[in-house]
Image: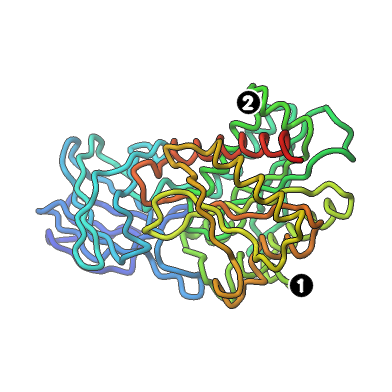
Amino acid sequence: MRLLATVFLTTICSANVLLAGDLTIESDFSGGSAKVLEIDQEKRLIRIEPEANPQRGWECWWYFQASGITPGETITLDVGNAPWATPDQAAFSTDNATWQQSPVGKREGKRIVYQLKVDRDTCWFAWGPPFRVEDAQRLVDESAKNSPHATAFELCQTRAGRPVPALLVKEEGVPDDQRKGIWIQARQHAWESGSSWVCHGFVMWLLSDDPRAASLRQKSLITIVPVMDIDNVAIGAGGKNQSPQDHNRDWSDQPHWNSVKVAQQQILEQDKAGRFDLFVDLHNPGANDRNPYFYTTAAEYLSDKGKRNLTQFLATARLEITGPLAFKGETRESGPSYDKNWTKISKNWVTKNTGDGVVAVTLETAWNNPSSNQQGYQTVGQQLGMAIERYFRTMP
């Protein structure tokens, strides 16, 4: 519903669309989120914060459309609250597909103010480059359509009845019983859109003509889930620490979320068949983390073989993930001192319940970096693919 304002300065309104003069703000679309606090038509200022979604996790994700812009004018965007909702640079797009970064904003307490020149009458603004439910489905469908080596499938239906798209990749090569089993997933925390773009870059490389990608396809069975928390991505909620727990604290004997439950089943089936070797969970980290790093499994879960393989994988990752978002060797352990629910974190569950040589890690790709954009994230995904290929080619 659109509301017409009769004054230049408008304040908070419960409607999805708010109009002040010529400026119209809308967030009632897939993945949208914005609570409009104020629009000052005269100053061309929009003041928002993430829309509240009780029980749905952190209020950090924002994404909305602004219309009524005079092409060439400067729009001021005021966003709160720090640290999770206030990246140094906002994402903006004039077509809702190709995203750019704003100039660095000016911090004012828990808020940040961005100023950017817009050359169209409509523009989308977001915390980071959105990767919506529709983008996940498109990635899976187009990959299967364009590559004979990719098969689209539905991992499961969510608790709200939405499909969770997934992709299976393999090329004719070694017998199935000799293939390496690889599981790549993203977006257990819905607000971490950059992780899905890393996944997108991985898929683009994996299905490319690169001889190393072809070699990996011929020797592996690769399962890819671009978005695990489909429901919260669909409604623009944060997902982190949602009720009863977020997806990455749900890996137990009785998981609440369907995507976790089915992922566990498929991983165990592959492991039972002797074809499971690598698990990579894609995330975005804290605001002050400027470079990618890996969370590793709790040391008490690792066998000598597991430690050796993990060391080898991290070494190959450092050789390949070279930037602009570069992995410089930093790791952190997800053990008892990290989180009281550490045993229910995905990589720890995988390590505990699969073969002793399986490598299970979380790749945290920085989101508050000048290269934290579509191209930067996808480059990390491509380089991750090359690291995986090198790992299996050179492992003892």
Cα separation between marks 2 and 1: 38 Å
173 lies left or right of 364: right
Secondary structure state at the residue bearing disc 1: loop
At which x and y percent is residue 141? 65, 37
Three-letter code, disc 2: Ser
Mark 1 = which residue?
253
User: Going by the picture, which residue comes out furthest to the left?
Assistant: 42
Identify the mark nearer the N-term, 2 or 1: 2
Quadrant containing the N terminus is: bottom left
27 and 92: which is toward the camera = 92
At which x and y percent is residue 129? 42, 45
At which x and y percent is residue 216? 72, 32
Q: Count the marks: how many?
A: 2
User: Which residue is located at x 21 percent, y 43 percent?
Assistant: 116
Determine the image quadrant of residue 244: bottom right
Mark 2 = which residue?
208
User: Which residue is located at x 58 percent, y 40 percent?
Assistant: 384
Secondary structure state at the residue bearing disc 2: loop
User: Which residue is located at x 77 percent, y 37 percent?
Assistant: 220
At which x and y percent is residue 312? 66, 45
Three-letter code, disc 1: Asp
Colour style of the rendered protein structure: rainbow
Quadrant containing the C terminus is: top right
48 lies left or right of 312: left
Q: Is residue 330 above or below residue 215?
A: below
